[in-house]
Image: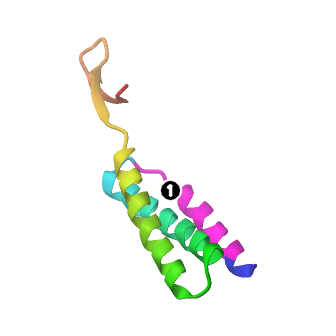
Amino acid sequence: MKKILLVALAATALAGCQSSSQRDRALVGGGLGAATGAIVGAAAGAGAAPVLAGAAIGAAGGAVIGAATTPKNCVAHDRYGNPYRVACP
């Protein structure tokens, strides 16, 4: 039970990290995916193999999703012609 609480606490701490960098989002997504995959693997089977397989699959999926959901920054101009960044639709 203590391990699950520790993993949940670590996942919550990582979820608070927000960045618009594609690399940062891929790393955080991979970490969250690995933690979640390890928990699911531990619940699904006994031994280290399901845990490691779940962590590997979760890390890969989380990294891909984290990188794919990176917001794109567009440049807009105010009425004076000064550029500023806005989120693209």
Q: Secondary structure at mark 1?
A: loop
* Looking at the image, residue 37 lies above or below residue 71: below
- Residue at image position (42%, 50%) is 19
Direction front: furthest residue:
45
Query: How far across and how far down the image is residue 47, in percent?
Result: 58, 88
Query: Residue at 62% of width from left, 61% of height from top?
Result: 12
Density class for disc 1 (Cα within 10 Å; few <14, some 14-19, many ≥20) is: few
Viewer-nearest residue: 31 or 47:
47
Residue, far left: 81
Left or right: 11 with respect to 58?
A: right
Q: Which quarter of the figure is the C terminus placed in? A: top left
Q: Is residue 10 magenta?
A: yes
User: Is 44 left, or right, of 37 in this rendering?
Assistant: right
Which corner quadrant holds the N terminus? bottom right
Q: Amino acid at mark 1?
A: Cys
- For label 1, the residue is 17
Q: Residue furthest right?
A: 1
Magenta part of the chain: 4-19
Which residue is nearer to you in this view: 46 or 79? Answer: 46
